[in-house]
């Protein structure tokens, strides 16, 4: 039996990661699940995020996914380690769950010349300290500065990424982190929504600062993972198909997919406690 790769996010942002994964690995099948009914995850506690994430991961397992990617920084920060170390050995020892933080942190230190990097993220990811902890494992000499950007996600989801309001809030947060840490030369967009603001960010970002988005990094890391784990690769179905599910209103989800995925996709509503609502 073979099955698709599951891609999970609390909402829409993971679509920016899925888009890059499909571009890198188009031959595989994918199921995307957005837990929009309970989003945002960013301001919730560890136990709640772990519970929500585990429910969705288990549902993707029931839908036949041998491998699930948490394309969500908050879920990766607050739930991934517990799922990998405590849950999987008991509920699904033959399945695997990967996140987006480690692939990003593995390369951050190779890009900075000043030894100082900035992390722009949700409050939940910042509070978790996941990025400083992971970067320290690979590059203990690198100094990490973090800043939550709470206005960026609502701007994007309300299709205001190209507005004057977006300019104001992009400049506000960039000025804040660069005032606090003027030696930063590498800036990580540690929320999968944030690449939608890349154009605006580059307009307000001083020269000489490298801007790092996660989509391509995660896609390349997944390709490498499957190369190193042929026992998992052979369990993945390869028909080039994608299916999309949301725990909220499919019509609302479909309206926003063009922003994040570059195309409008047919979506079904899914009850993570039950099944697909037809």
Image (spheres, grey):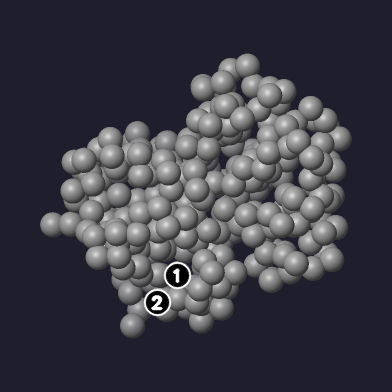
Q: Residue 65: x, y in percent?
A: 27, 56
Residue toward you, 273 or 92: 92
* Label 2 close to label 1 by CB (< 8 Å): yes
Picture residue at 18% right of the left edge, 41% below the top: 231
Q: Residue 95: x, y in percent?
A: 25, 45
Whichever of labels 2 and 1 marks the residue nearer the N terminus, that label is 1
Picture residue at 64% right of the left edge, 54% below the top: 194
Res. 27 image quadrant: bottom left
Picture residue at 63% right of the left edge, 16% below the top: 141
Res. 140 image quadrant: top right
Q: Secondary structure at mark 1?
A: strand
Residue 182 vs 31, above or below: the answer is: above
23 with respect to 138 (left or right): left
Q: Residue 166: x, y in percent?
A: 79, 61
Quadrant placement of the C terminus:
bottom left
Residue 268: which numbered mark, if any? Answer: 2
The residue that disc 1 covers is 246
Q: Residue 71: x, y in percent?
A: 47, 51
User: Local crowd at mark 2 within 10 Å, few (<14), some, or many (≥20)?
Assistant: many
Residue toward you, 264 or 247: 264
Residue 85 vs 142, above or below: the answer is: below
């Amino acid at each position: 039996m073979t099955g698709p790769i599951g891609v999970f996010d609390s909402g829409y942002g993971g679509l920016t990661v899925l888009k890059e994964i499909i571009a890198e690995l188009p031959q595989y099948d994918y199921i995307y699940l957005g837990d929009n009914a309970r989003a945002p995850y960013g301001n919730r506690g560890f136990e709640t995020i772990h519970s929500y994430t585990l429910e969705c991961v288990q549902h993707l397992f029931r839908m036949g996914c041998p491998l699930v990617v948490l394309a969500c920084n908050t879920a990766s920060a607050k739930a991934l380690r517990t799922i990998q170390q405590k849950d999987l050995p008991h509920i699904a020892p033959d399945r695997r769950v990967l996140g987006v933080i480690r692939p990003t942190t593995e390369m951050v230190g190779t890009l900075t010349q000043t030894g100082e990097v900035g992390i722009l993220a949700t409050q939940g990811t910042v509070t978790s300290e996941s990025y400083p902890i992971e970067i320290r494992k690979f590059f203990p000499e690198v100094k990490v500065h973090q800043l939550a950007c709470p206005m960026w996600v609502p701007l994007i989801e309300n299709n205001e990424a190209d507005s004057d309001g977006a300019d104001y809030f992009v400049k506000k947060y960039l000025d804040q982190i660069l005032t606090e840490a003027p030696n930063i030369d590498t800036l990580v967009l540690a929320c999968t929504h944030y690449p939608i603001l890349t154009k605006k960010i580059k307009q307000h970002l001083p020269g000489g600062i490298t801007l790092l988005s996660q989509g391509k990094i995660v896609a390349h890391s997944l390709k490498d993972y499957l190369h190193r784990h042929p026992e998992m690769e052979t369990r993945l179905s390869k028909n080039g198909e994608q299916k999309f599910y949301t725990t909220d209103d499919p019509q609302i989800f479909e309206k926003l997919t063009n922003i994040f995925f570059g195309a409008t996709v047919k979506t079904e509503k899914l009850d993570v406690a039950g099944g697909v609502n037809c």
